[in-house]
């Protein structure tokens, strides 16, 4: 019987002290330790601890989505809003002592959206001030939504169409300063439109004609070029709580086949984040304007017109709810940190589309009001639930794995 | 029972703790060698194996799973005079005159530094070097925008925790210019995918890119000397190591870990958790033992290691349901009061203040089982050590940070002293504060008041003294005379008691002060006959 048990019994039932006596405190402690020495065993982590440890040390992440090597991912590059839950995978690797990088990937969603891409870049030229890259991309979006053009389109007219595109794009981006990037994109895009596969709605050609949906029956290939400037001094781009971002982009699409669908577009984006109480309260503002203009005898194809509606523009209506040649939307959020992993937000959105820029007006905006829950780290929002109303089309619920803006 | 606990459980069942309070293993309250000054860690621990601790699991376990035992129990590793014996955990460094022993490590030798690897542990970027004497150091940098902040906080806090009595690394300040670095041919680092690869100049430049640089182009860094011995991983703040035969007292019931709550509050050491500790296997005379260290003090004082200290630090756990719910339901209109605290604009200091600070409300990042079990006498023990740091000693330690802005030195010193005053006021008055009890050969009892000595209380209105003869074999008292009431800290043993020549005399002391009701908690003191005189063998605060 272990000495300790004897001692415990002795203390309990009053054996003579001599039966278990130690002469000194030191001796007593030594015997106690000797007893433990006979029972040593290594520490064994429990199941939950082992699981957390594996997740924390990144082995699982590195196995699934390594910086270099074959990877899989939830979602995929260029996955559009409304594609449903999707997964991606591929291979990526640094080359030439990290001076170059290659990425080959593909993705698909439960709604059968598909993407295949290859990207090669030189991201660290001139002391990391210049990035050159080229990307080849194939996209297939079989359940895109269209409600008709303009701000007065009807929810009941919703149809579905297929968008496919093959694209080759080159890029040159200069980091003028840590907060300023300017760059240019040049590319070739070959889109095609077909019947949508969303069985809940008619296909596009059954509900609209070429007048309402320019480019419905014929799609040219495009050569395009863009110049942009991007001022970005947000504290954390993935979960901004302070700073701002202002972007302007000018793009020209040249119709290479039909000489009917060439156009220009101007994209303006303004974001500002005003923190209070050590960034635990944030007022976030976004304003965006997209304008397109086609030359004489040309039209902007419907599938390249800007849209308003959905989780990142106007949350009181569905994704892509409004579409026309011009669009603008305004968003304001009051965000408060509930605890370090959860922010909540009260928000309002205002958005509008119009056939002409002059018809965009602050008095004709469709509103949205709502509340959101954003689970986040300091660097990123990884899950959010936004609920909104106000657009006259009921309550809208958005469950997303990204930030609002 | 996730960690090895049975020896301690049985030890307690048998009443065998270092203090021997309650009953001895053989019904003796005091052994001849009481009070022991060194815990005899007699067993060879060479079979101890390295363990890993998950940061996230540690948070989850301590926040939600109730790690460790929560019970109102006296600390188990104190000796019979309520002090912590020296051990592999703690060394008493507050000297007989109650002056802290301060040391200043030399740091790496001047000359070329050979980079041997890139640091992958912790949040602060850095690398390891070998200096010209062959010693290995971990080099950590101040974040950009906060020059001198993290290194200053770490060197100050290391000096404090060492002086308190803990085992800590030798941390010192050093300065180097990039051209003084060479990369060892076999230097490696882990890449983004966890694979080892050769360390190249770009990797060093990446680190330097994010580090604060001095106006002359050099870098001021924190150099932490590699701890000797085999690394066994962090310790937990509960249970015992199942592979260490000397580790028999559950950590949540160790006095020095309970009292760490007081030191951590003073210095705002919010990241006092398992991952910031390290066990090493070190040789002693004839065996190997596990030595337990505290390390990584980059998130102390006003430093948050890679940025200024978070406002939450010290004020709220990472997860607390009540403020979370209130904040949620009030749509954020409820603003946690600590968010409104003003801090001076001093990048070298970060966020550190003394106005809003309340020692009893201070919290680490998440619950700590040892802190949860801390009793008033544990905090009193720690507060007495804090009291040993005179204003001059505090100022001397702060000066070791060598802040280029004298305002930072002054501000930190003043803030530490004000926080010290609050710590002492709260915890020296949190229980019976009588100390230094002595019984002369003639039977005169003298004692002192720690709170009064520290200047955080006025003298007691009166004291109550009850004498008794104590039978060590049966742990029974035979009262001698009526309870005495005295106005000064002096009393005299009843003649009848002295004439009876008992082997042990016990005295129960109470103090009374209108502002401090806790002073009237009893203090039991025991003396053993030693020739013609008396030796103090027992102190029980809040028995």
Image (cartoon, rainbow, N blue to C red):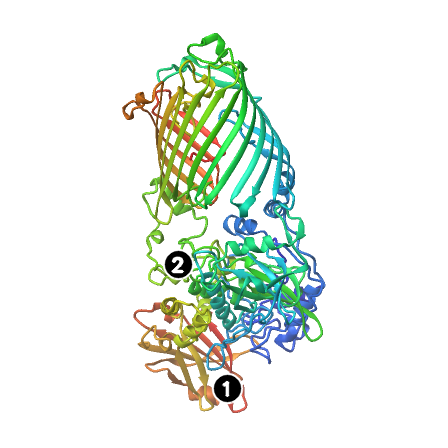
Residue at horizontal 47 percent and vertical 23 percent from the top: A253
- Relative side of A35 to A398, left or right: right
Residue occupied by mark 1: B534
| Label 1, residues with CA under 10 Å away: few <14, some 14-19, many ≥20 | many
Mark 2 residue crowding within 10 angstroms, few (<14) / some (14–19) / many (20+): many
Q: Nearer the viewer, residue B37 or B96?
A: B96
Q: Could you tell me which chain the residue with mark 2 belongs to?
A: B
Same subunit, tags 1 and 2:
yes
Residues under labels 1 and 2: Cα distance?
Answer: 51 Å
Please indicate, yes or no, whether residue B236 appears anywhere in the rendered image.
Answer: yes
- Marks 1 and 2: CB-CB under 8 Å? no
Chain under disc 1: B
> Can you see residue B121?
no
Q: Position of residue A173 (x, y in %)?
A: 50, 38
Residue B139: image location, x then y, percent: 56, 62
The image position of residue A289, as x and y in percent, is 37, 28
Can you give x and y, in whole percent of width and height, for residue B394 in the image? 42, 73
Q: Secondary structure at mark 2?
A: loop
Q: Quadrant of residue A354?
A: top left
- What residue is shown with label 2? B351
Q: Vertically, is A277 above or below B45?
A: above
Residue at 66% across, 67% down: B229
Q: Nearer the viewer, residue B519 or B299?
A: B299
Task: Assign a secondary structure to mark 1.
Answer: strand
Nearer the observer, B468 or B457: B457
Name the image quarter holding residue A346. Answer: top left
Q: Nearer the viewer, mark 1 or mark 2?
A: 2
Residue B88 falls in image quadrant: bottom right
Instruction: Looking at the picture, tell me which residue is in the foreground, A307 or A249.
Output: A249
N-term-proximal mark, 1 vs 2? 2
């Amino acid at each position: 019987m272990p000495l300790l048990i004897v001692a415990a019994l002795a203390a309990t039932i009053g054996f003579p002290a001599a039966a278990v006596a130690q002469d000194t405190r030191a001796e007593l402690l030594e015997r106690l330790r000797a007893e433990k020495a006979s029972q040593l065993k290594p520490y064994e982590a429990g199941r939950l601890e082992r699981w957390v440890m594996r997740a924390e040390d990144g082995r699982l992440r590195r196995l699934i989505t390594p910086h270099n090597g074959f990877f899989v991912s939830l979602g995929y590059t260029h996955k559009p809003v409304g594609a449903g839950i999707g997964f991606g995978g591929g291979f990526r690797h640094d080359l030439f002592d990290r001076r170059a990088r290659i990425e080959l990937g593909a993705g698909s969603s439960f709604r059968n959206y598909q993407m295949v891409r290859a990207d090669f870049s030189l991201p660290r030229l001139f002391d990391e001030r210049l990035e050159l890259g080229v990307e080849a991309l194939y996209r297939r979006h079989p359940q895109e939504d269209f409600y008709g053009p303009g701000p007065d389109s009807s929810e009941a007219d919703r149809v579905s169409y297929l968008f496919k595109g093959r694209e080759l794009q080159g890029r040159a981006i200069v980091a003028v300063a840590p907060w300023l990037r300017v760059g240019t994109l040049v590319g070739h895009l070959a889109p095609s439109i077909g019947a949508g596969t969303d069985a809940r709605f008619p296909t596009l050609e059954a509900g609209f004609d070429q007048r309402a949906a320019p480019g419905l029956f014929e799609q040219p290939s495009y050569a395009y070029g863009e110049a942009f400037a991007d001022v970005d001094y947000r504290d954390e781009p993935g979960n901004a709580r302070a700073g701002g971002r202002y972007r302007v982009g000018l793009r020209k699409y040249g119709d290479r086949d039909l000489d009917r669908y060439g156009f220009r577009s101007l994209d303006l984006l303004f974001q500002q984040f005003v923190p209070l109480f050590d960034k635990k309260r944030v007022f976030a503002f976004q304003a965006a304007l997209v304008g397109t203009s086609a030359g004489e005898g040309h039209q902007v194809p419907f599938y390249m017109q800007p849209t308003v509606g959905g989780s990142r523009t106007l949350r009181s209506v569905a994704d892509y709810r409004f579409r026309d040649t011009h669009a603008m939307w305004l968003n304001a959020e009051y965000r408060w940190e509930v605890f370090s992993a959860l922010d909540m937000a009260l928000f309002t959105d205002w958005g509008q589309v119009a056939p002409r820029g002059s018809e965009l007006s602050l008095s004709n905006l469709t509103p949205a009001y709502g509340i959101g829950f954003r689970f986040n780290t300091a660097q990123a929002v990884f899950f959010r639930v936004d609920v909104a109303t106000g657009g006259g089309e009921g309550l809208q619920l958005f469950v997303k794995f990204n930030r609002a803006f | 029972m996730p960690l090895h606990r049975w020896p301690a459980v049985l030890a307690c069942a048998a009443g065998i703790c270092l203090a021997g309070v309650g009953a001895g293993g053989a019904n003796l309250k005091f052994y001849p060698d009481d009070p022991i000054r060194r815990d005899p860690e007699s067993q060879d621990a060479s079979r101890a194996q390295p363990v890993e601790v998950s940061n996230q699991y540690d948070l989850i376990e301590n926040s939600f799973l109730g790690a460790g035992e929560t019970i109102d129990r006296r600390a188990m590793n104190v000796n019979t005079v309520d002090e912590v014996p020296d051990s592999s955990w703690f060394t008493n460094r507050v000297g007989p005159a109650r002056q802290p022993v301060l040391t200043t490590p030399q740091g790496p030798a001047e000359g070329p530094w050979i980079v041997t690897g890139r640091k992958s542990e912790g949040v602060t970027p850095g690398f390891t070097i070998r200096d010209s004497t062959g010693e290995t150091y971990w080099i950590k940098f101040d974040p950009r925008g906060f020059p001198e902040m993290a290194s200053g906080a770490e060197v100050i806090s290391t000096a404090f925790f060492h002086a308190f009595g803990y085992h800590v690394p030798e941390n010192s300040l050093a300065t180097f210019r990039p051209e003084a670095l060479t990369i060892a041919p076999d230097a490696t680092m882990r890449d983004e995918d966890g694979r080892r690869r050769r360390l190249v100049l770009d990797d060093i430049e990446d680190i330097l890119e994010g580090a604060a640089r001095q106006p002359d182009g050099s870098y001021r860094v924190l150099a932490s000397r590699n701890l000797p011995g085999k690394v066994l991983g962090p310790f937990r703040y509960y249970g015992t190591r199942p592979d260490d035969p000397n580790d028999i007292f559950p950590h949540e019931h160790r006095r020095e870990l309970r009292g760490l709550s007081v030191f951590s509050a003073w210095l705002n050491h919010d990241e006092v958790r398992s991952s910031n500790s390290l066990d090493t296997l070190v040789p002693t005379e004839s065996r190997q033992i596990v030595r337990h260290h505290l390390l990584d003090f980059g998130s102390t004082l006003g430093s948050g290691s890679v940025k200024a200290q978070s406002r939450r630090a010290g004020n709220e756990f990472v997860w607390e349901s009540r403020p979370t719910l209130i904040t949620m339901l009030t749509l954020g209109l409820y603003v946690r009061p600590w968010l409104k605290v003003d801090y001076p604009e001093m990048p070298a200091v970060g966020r550190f203040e003394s106005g809003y600070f309340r020692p009893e409300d201070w919290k680490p990042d998440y619950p700590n089982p040892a802190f949860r079990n801390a009793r008033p006498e544990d905090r009193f023990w720690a507060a007495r050590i804090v009291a040993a740091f005179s204003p001059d000693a505090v100022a001397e330690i702060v000066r070791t940070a060598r802040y280029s802005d004298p305002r930072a030195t002054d501000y930190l010193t003043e803030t530490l002293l004000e926080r010290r005053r609050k710590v002492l006021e709260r915890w020296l008055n949190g229980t019976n504060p009588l100390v230094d009890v002595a019984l002369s050969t003639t039977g005169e009892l003298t004692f002192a008041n720690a709170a009064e000595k520290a200047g955080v209380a006025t003298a007691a209105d009166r004291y109550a003294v009850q004498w008794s003869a104590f039978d060590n074999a049966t742990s029974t008292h035979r009262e001698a005379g009526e309870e005495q009431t005295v106005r000064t800290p002096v009393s005299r043993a009843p003649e009848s008691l002295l004439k009876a020549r008992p082997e042990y005399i016990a005295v129960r002391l109470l103090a009374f002060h209108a502002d401090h009701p806790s002073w009237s908690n009893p203090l039991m003191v025991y003396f053993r006959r030693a020739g013609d005189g008396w030796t103090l063998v027992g102190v029980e605060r809040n028995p």
